[in-house]
Amino acid sequence: MKVKTISRSTDEFTRERSNDLQRVFRNYDPNLRPQEKAVEYVRALNAAKLEKIFGRPFVGAMEHNEAISCMAKNPNHLKGIFAGSEDGDIRLWDITSRRTVRKFPGHRGAVRGLTATTDGSRLVSCGADCIIRRWTVPVEDSSEDSVKPEDFHISKNAYWGVDHQWKGDQFATVGAQVDIWNHTSNAPVRSFQWGTDTVISVRFNPGHPDLLATSASDRSITLYDIKMTVPIKKLIMQTKTNSIAWNPMEPMNFTAANEDGNCYSYDLRKLNEATMVHTDHAAAVMDIDYSPTGREFVTGSYDRTVRIFRYNGGHSREIYHTSRMQRVFCVKFSCDASYVISGSDDYNLRLWKAMASEQLGVLLPREKKRHEYDEALKNRYKHLPEVKRILRHRHLPLPIYKAAALRRTMTESARKKEEKRKAHSAPGSISTKPLRKRRIVKEVE
Amino acid sequence: MSVVKATKEEKKKKETGEEEEEISEDLDLKVKKYLRGGAANFDDLKDKKLKGQLSHREFLYGASAKAAAKYEKWLMPSEGGYLEADGPVEKTWRIKQEDIRREVDISSSRNQHDVILPEFSPYTLDFTSNGQYMAAAGRKGHLAIVDMKNMIPRREIQVGETVRDVVFLQDQSFFAAAQKKYTYIYGQEGIEAHCLKDQGAVLKLQFLKNHFLLASINKFGQLHYEDVSMGAMVGNIRTGLGRTDVMQVNPYNAVVALGHSGGTVTMWKPTSSAPLVKMLCHHGPVSALAFHPNGHLMATAGKEKKIKLWDLRKFEVLQTLPGHAKTLDFSQRGLLACGIGSFVQVLSDFSGTQNYSRYMNHSMVKGYKISNLLFRPYEDVLGIGHSMGWSSILIPGSGEPNFDSWVANPFETRKQRGEKEVHLLLDKLPPETIMLDPTKIGTVKTARKKEKLTKKEVEAEMEATVEAVKDSINMKKKTKGRSKPSKKLKKRQEIIAKAKRPFLEQQMQDGQLSIKKQKVSEEVELPKSLQRFARKKAAT
């Protein structure tokens, strides 16, 4: 007869010395794990609750002396951000210590636009005092506290915005018309004008260095190519667009922050229909910025909240608000996609975490694995009612909550009325335009 | 020469090719175990984005199942035990424990022993989930915790009254003993921690590990669930089927099964007062019950000398074996041990076909009556509690050779035990998750067809809504004579009528049709001559 029984020797299964790691043996047999789905569900529930427990997004605030009107980030330096306020005060802030590194005094009116060159060596600012100033951003170690401007240009009309090419050394300013400047020249290299209304914002395309989009107060969005003499396309909507942001990972898409509280994403090749309508804000959206991953964007609105949307999501993933934060006029996503900076009416720049319950700092490999496991669990069970209720829960300030409820009843009743009209009229006589097209008036070449 | 060489190389390639095929077939079988069900069908999906995302997920499932199968094939540290007979003449069930002892190494032969304690009479045994500690309870009041690594009793106490059953709670730090009047919970030093008075005189105890529920059946046939982490009662169910002391837990879905004297086996969950399943298993009383770890196989023994094996998915008999069994137990690998009198019979399904046949026998000294059989987890050992103490014998091939350190670790340190307890508490399942098919959690609920409510139910609903509306009416105070009582009353009646309207509409839709049908049929039934006597409207 052949016999063998299980006999385990202790030294094979335990560690040799006390400073060794304990030995771990695995057997993935499902029979050893009864009720594994229920255990996973309980763990998903716990993970959702932990996410809410650790959800503290606010990191800190940086104060100016006046309302903040514009911000610029320097793609080469993660730690710094430029902010300009309504009294002409431009500062370079160090985000990690939340202290002012440099001041750039000079503007006498509100600073309307700030932009940094791609290599981070120069800053261009333009203001309501009709002056464009160029500054050299000083190197870390230099001792001066405030910087003198390198050059400035005066014009007849106030400037409303400025943006620099991603690749190249030309920048565009907008105000009465769109001007393209060079760092060396004294006058604009080229000027564009379509219509007589002020152009309020400008953004260069990250992929195609000569393409730019502007928005004007005649409710239009215009696309220009700086190498050509005439503008490319114009899109007129029902309400004014306050700001535009290009998706850095998909440069043919851009998202426009509109006055009606929605953000409209467009593909520049097909402007007759928005690819996505992002609704959730209760008042005008003032500024928008994409994350460097291209998967999310942050918006700041006149209704005192900052929201983060997924690039293809109709509703916001996250909302940040404080009773001290008043109207948000500018927002920026930090270049490492972990922070969001908002500049608002109450003289403060606020730093928020992009993922509210993220653990910052260097994570141990076990911590990382555990976070990934929790994310996967929440993803798998997010449709179940208890988990969904916890994940969805956000505290909203009362005016926002009421505004959202009001908007819901309004759209619901409008929809019902439309349904009844259709039901009581000849089939096919009434056709509803999809929301993506409804807000567009026309497209002009 | 070169031609010969070439053919030899071809042969080698063929062989390796065949070997590779065999290996991949072998792997495929193993992969099936880890896939946990078949792949989903995406043909009906029209949403391309969703289809892409789901098929990527399916690919990941397949990859992880393959990785687990490969790990099982190549990296598992130990292989299971076995007992094979030489030649056609020798049979495995004739091999005695002494013969096995001679062939096996010393550390295994230590596992074969008898402990004789005649004063405290029949012993009941329980093992912790990692097989390292054993609790033994003698009927006359002896409680002992034995450390199985060194065979040393850690703690022994004499409680001075009848002890009917003992069970470990989550690990060796607590155990519960069903004593004469109440159930007591003891700590690992033998100190009495709790006295559970709600349960009454308990006959059998079982612990549901993942839910921290102590299930007990008492003399009056009441099934009681107690949450030992919080000390709260979760369910107290009057089974209504009389006194029984056959109780087992199905490890796959944590459902408690009771065997009754009418031959029925009922299955219970703590949140409902009616049994989930009631099956008639035997012509006489059910004497023993056991569940296979995979949850699909149940063995029942009846007093009419039959042992039946049931498939729990279809609730059908798979096999009927002649035999007597006062106690049954399945091992981790699917061996079935039946005990009667002083005789133990172990049955095995060779190569997993679920066709059980004799594997091993063991007869003890004539006077020893077996009261309790229990396989030790992760070892090839069967523990026998009998009227003169307890014994343990070797059954090669019964235990799972490869343990998972994060499920049950036989080489646990003190720190690891503490961490494990915390994790168990964090993952404690709520009692609502106990159901016959535990894989249904997280799946889509099939929409039930709305059953037609009876008239009474409809009326009750209508009244309920009317009451609710009445409570919520807030009449606004109007000035200038607009809030007269008569107007207020009218408004109130309007609101109530509005609440009633949907029910009345529904009734009209159903009701009128039936009235019409009646009228038609009445007129048709009567012959022409008698039509004058048909019920007429009072129009004339």
Image: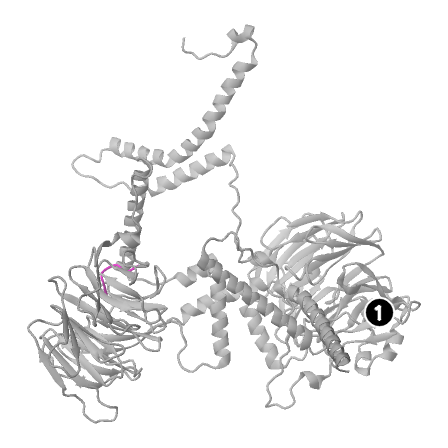
Residue at far left of view: A156
Task: Look at the numbered disc 1 and give the secondary structure of its residue.
Answer: loop
Camera-side residue: B490 or B37?
B37
How many numbered marks are there? 1
- Highlighted magenta segment, given as a residue range: A279-287
Q: Is residue A321 visible?
A: no
Residue A440 located left or right of residue B56: left
Residue at far right of view: B89
Q: Is residue B323 visible?
A: yes
- How many other residues sit within 10 Å of disc 1, few (<14), some (14-19) or many (≥20)? many
The chain letter for the residue carrying disc 1 is B
Residue at far top of view: B529
- What residue appears at the point 80 percent right and 66 percent down from the top-left corner? B122
x then y, percent, for residue B362: 87, 67
x then y, percent, for residue B420: 59, 75
x then y, percent, for residue A14: 66, 84
Residue A286 lies in magenta, yes or no? yes
Quadrant position of residue A268 = bottom left
Quadrant position of residue A25 = bottom right
Q: Vertically, is A127 above or below A142?
A: above
**Residue that badge 1 annotates:** B388
Q: Vertically, is B268 above or below B129?
A: above
Quadrant position of residue A234 = bottom left
- Residue type at tag 1: Met
- Rendered-image quadrant of the C terminus of chain A: bottom left
Camera-side residue: A198 or B368?
A198
- What residue appears at the point 20 percent right and 55 percent down from the top-left corner? A238
- Rendered-image quadrant of the N terminus of chain A: bottom right
x then y, percent, for residue A420: 31, 39
